[in-house]
Amino acid sequence: MFEIKKKSEPMPYYHKPPMRFRDFEIHYNRDYSLNHIVRNKHSYYEFYFLISGDVTYYIEDREFDLKPGAIILIAPEQYHQATINTRTGQAYERYVLWLDPEYLKRLSTDKSDLLLPFQKTYITSAHIQLTRDMQILINNLLEMILTSSVSKEYGADLLTNSYIIELLVHIARMKLFQQDTYLDQRLNDNPENSPIITNTLNYINSHIYEDIRIQDITDYLYISRSYLSRVFNEEMGLSVHQFIAKKKLFLARQDLLGGTPVKEICQKYSFGNYSSFYRAFRTEFGQSPRAVRKNV
């Protein structure tokens, strides 16, 4: 369990009604004797963030043993259920954010689809375990969404929208670019996923520390460069080159937060030189590598 000071007081589960508002709804709950949530489904997306508790979560036929700092992403019409081990004496504390699909479409742009974190193409499972720094960030964003959503101050609605956008952008980046995102065997077994995409992502994961060329991938897959580019763009929403660059930068940032020297990171991910790494990193994250290091 991670301890973070909160301005909002949680409610027990029985106070939580079905979704009443069109766009989104957020709940912050804490229970001590609740041992399960009834299996259910609904027509909106659900973003679930566990703060404390010993929880097993079920989505359709999948089972996830959750630790504090876990996120669960649930798509519309997916059956889901939580069982809680109350014998530990831990409080079952969590945020639940409901999001209407049309609302997310309105917030999205041509370049950034906010439905992305929930789409099966992009996730091997519905479960993300956050690092300590991301736990704090996500917790703070959810707290701000909760506070601003009930505020009557001028601009509160705009701030709420911006916090929700920021939340989903962070999650999308994590699911797209973390090292083991596409290594789960279930991705390969899922008939809904394109074999070209699956094999391309597996190749990128296996060679992420190298200077990957598009030609290397097309030679490996025995397909043309134009065909790979078209399929990848259609299914992933960005080019192969952009994906590789963003994935390397995300992993570099994780290493940076973990204390790895900048020079070593440049060499590890084959950025070529520090100037190239610096420009790409600052463009992607809005901060220099050293500024990120200082914030750790």
Image: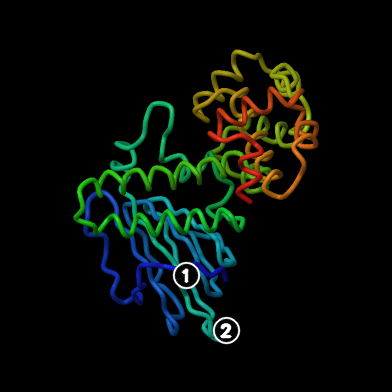
Looking at numbered disc 1 in the image, what kind of residue is underneath it? Ala
Which quadrant does the N terminus fall into? bottom right
Looking at numbered disc 2 in the image, what kind of residue is underneath it? Thr
Q: Is residue 214 left or right of residue 36?
A: right
Residue topped by disc 1: 82
Mark 1 surroundings within 10 Å by alpha-carbon count, few (fewer than 14), some (14 through 19), many (20 or more): some
Q: Earlier in the sequence, mark 1 or mark 2?
A: 1
- Residue at (31, 45) in percent of width and height: 161
Count of numbered circles on the image? 2
Q: Toward which corner of the image does residue 206 lie, by quadrant?
A: top right
Dot 2 falls on a residue whose secondary structure is helix
**Residue 259 picture location, percent across and down:** 73, 48
Residue in front for this viewpoint, 283 or 234? 283
- Residue at (59, 16) in percent of width and height: 227
Q: Is residue 217 left or right of residue 103?
A: right
**Residue 122 picture location, percent across and down:** 54, 40
- Residue at (49, 25) in percent of width and height: 234
Q: Is residue 196 above or below residue 218?
A: below
Instruction: Tell me whether the residue at label 1 lies in contact with that at label 2, contact meaning CB atoms closer than 8 angstroms.
Output: no
Q: Is residue 71 above or below residue 92?
A: above
Residue 88 image label: 2
**Residue 87 picture location, percent across and down:** 55, 86
Q: Toward which corner of the image does residue 130 lie, by quadrant?
A: bottom right
Dot 1 falls on a residue whose secondary structure is strand
- Residue at (59, 67) in percent of width and height: 67
Mark 2 surroundings within 10 Å by alpha-carbon count, few (fewer than 14), some (14 through 19), many (20 or more): few
Residue in front for this viewpoint, 39 or 83? 83
Q: How is the image coloured?
A: rainbow
Residue 279 image label: none
Q: Is residue 295 left or right of residue 211?
A: left
Residue in front for this viewpoint, 75 or 137? 137
Q: CA distance from mark 1 to mark 2?
A: 16 Å
